[in-house]
Amino acid sequence: MTDPVVATRTLWAVLQRDIAAEGVLTDALMQDLNALFEKVLPAALEILDRGWVHRVVSQSGRWVSIVKGRAQSQYVCIGDFCPCQFYQHHVLTGEVLLCKHLLAVQLRQCLRPPLKPKEVTDAEYAWYIATPATVVNSPARKPL
């Protein structure tokens, strides 16, 4: 018997490959996405539509994705980790595969045109990862 988490990850990998091959979200791909990510897809698509996914790349080649949120917040997504509450309560428990922030990031990586990264120094990069979720208007974080 196949583990449902493994099966979902496998389906998502295949779907990512198909989206990257198309470069756009076709109706068929949207149906597949909705079947896999029904809970978070509408919010992830809104993030994409608003252009709230950004990539920061350090001088040494390390990168993170920054996702702006509705409440003047931004989330620093590192690999398959997001600091949002939904991630902690639903992704880590295995209830769902991705939060809306990670889904938006991973979808954006598959779409054309490619996301143009913001290049920063290694010190600036360290500053971004030091506080993974914060309010944009806070003195601790400059908005992108």
Image (tube, rainbow, N blue to C red):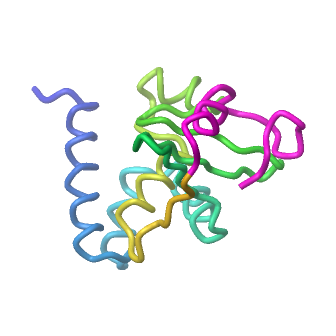
Residue 126 falls inside the magenta stretch: yes
Left or right position of 33 against 120 = left
Instruction: Please give the name of the residue rendered at 48% of the width and 29% of the height, measured from the top-left corner.
Output: 91
Nearer to the camera, 46 or 134: 134
Instruction: Please give the name of the residue rendered at 28% of the width and 67% of the height, measured from the top-left corner.
Output: 20
Residue 24 image point, x, y percent: 37, 77
Left or right position of 76 against 25 = right
Nearer to the camera, 16 or 1: 16
Q: Which of the 4 image quadrants contains residue 61? A: top left
Magenta residues, as a range?
Answer: 120-144
Left or right position of 18 against 34 = left
Instruction: Please give the name of the residue rendered at 51% of the width and 56% of the height, measured from the top-left corner.
Output: 41
Residue 55 falls inside the magenta stretch: no
Instruction: Please give the name of the residue rendered at 55% of the width and 64% of the height, measured from the top-left corner.
Output: 45
State whether residue 66 is above or below residue 116. Answer: above
Residue 74 image point, x, y percent: 71, 44
Direction left: furthest residue: 1
The N terminus, quarter of image:
top left
Q: Which of the 4 image quadrants contains residue 125? A: top right
Residue 29 image point, x, y percent: 32, 70
Nearer to the camera, 53 or 118: 118
Residue 115 image point, x, y percent: 47, 66
Direction top: furthest residue: 93
State whether residue 34 is above or below residue 129. Answer: below
The C terminus, quarter of image:
bottom right
